[in-house]
Image (spheres, rainbow, N blue to C red):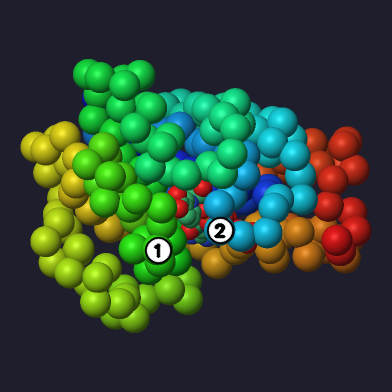
Amino acid sequence: MLRAIFGGTFDPIHCGHLNAAKALVEELNYVTIHLMPNAVPPHRPQPRANGAHRLAMIECAIRSHAHMCAEPFELNQDGPSYTAKTLAAMREHYPNDTLAFIMGMDSLLTFDQWFDWQSILACAHLVVLPRPGYQLRTANSTVTQLLHDRQVSSPDELYQDSSGRIYIANTTLTDVSSTAVRDALASGDSAEIPSQVMTYIRHHGLYSSPL
Ligand SMILES: Nc1ncnc2c1ncn2[C@@H]1O[C@H](COP(=O)(O)OP(=O)(O)OP(=O)(O)O)[C@@H](O)[C@H]1O
Ligand SMILES: O=C(O)c1ccc[n+]([C@@H]2O[C@H](COP(=O)([O-])O)[C@@H](O)[C@H]2O)c1
């Protein structure tokens, strides 16, 4: 079976994340998607909402969806949430399953700047979500070469090796970001988030001010 870890800051989870996860459940066979909020993002400003809230919002969003779970692993670790460290630990925890790491196209374009990125490919496949505004043709030479060497065109090929393949998914593009959601919520506008997540945000008074 394939365990696909969808890592993110999820500050908060939005319809772009959820639509993509739903589409991947259909597109990848025998998959469980672990939506995993990071504790300390290694590469960007720290999240507005704490880890417990971000995990709880994921739980609200996926409540009625099969083959998805909220993954607390990184919230229980100290230090920066490096994906290489996380996947090495998960590899040990799930020795009989194939692992994949799900990321948006924006993340793939900077993948060669990630901490110990080569060891990520030794532990897991990559599943990449197309994202509005981020084109593969703008990739630098390292990422272009990685795709040349490792890209597969069918999800079935992910089951032929235990790690190191890159699959670009067929999901429909959803033009939404957590930044746009936070801005909309601070202005009192509607935001592209699941209704259960909106109820949670209102109940806990999250994102009500611009900063
Ligand atoms: N609309 C989207 N389509 C495809 N991938 C997405 C989309 N939104 C986020 N992702 C991907 O999901 C992962 C987690 O994203 P993240 O939690 O940072 O959301 P974000 O919308 O990019 O947030 P922010 O605006 O705060 O940077 C990343 O790999 C990101 O590329
Ligand atoms: O390990 C790294 O160096 C690294 C660098 C950038 C991003 N990541 C991970 O990629 C995922 C998406 O990140 P983000 O900032 O787009 O939410 C999330 O799980 C991050 O922890 C990891």
Kindly identify the residue that appears in the image at 11 percent across and 38 percent down: 161
* Residue 87, placed above or below residue 181: above
Rendered image quadrant of residue 180? bottom right
Q: Look at the picture and state if 167 lies above or below 204.
A: below
Asked if residue 29 is positioned above or below residue 173 in the image, the reply reads above
Give the camera-side residue of 126 and 119: 119
Q: Could you tell me which quadrant the C terminus lies in?
A: bottom right
Residue 130 appearing in the image: no
Which corner quadrant of the figure contains ligand 1?
bottom right
Give the class, few, some or many, for how many residues have Cα within 10 Å of label 2's Cα (few <14, many ≥20): few
| Mark 1 sits near ligand 2, with its Cβ under 8 Å away | yes
Q: Label 1: which residue?
A: 113
Q: Which label was assigned to residue 43?
A: 2
Q: Is residue 74 left or right of residue 188?
A: left
For label 2, being within 8 Å of ligand 2 is answered: yes
Relative to 107, 122 lies left or right? left
x and y, in percent, of residue 93 in the image: 35, 19
Q: Is residue 210 visible?
A: yes
Estimate the x, y position of residue 107 in percent, counting from the top left: 43, 61
Q: Kindly identify the residue that appears in the image at 24 percent across and 30 percent down.
A: 98
Q: Quadrant of residue 60?
A: top right
Instruction: Locate residue 150 relative to residue 73 in the image: left or right.
Output: left
Within 10 Å of disc 1 (Cα), the crowding (few <14, some 14-19, many 20+) is few
Horizontal and vertical percent for residue 138?
34, 81
Quarter of the image containing the N terminus?
top left
**Residue contact at pointers 1 and 2, CB within 8 angstroms:** yes
Query: Amino acid under label 2?
Result: His
Q: Calculate the distance from the C-alpha at mark 1 to the C-alpha at mark 2.
A: 10 Å
Amino acid type indicated by mark 1: Gln
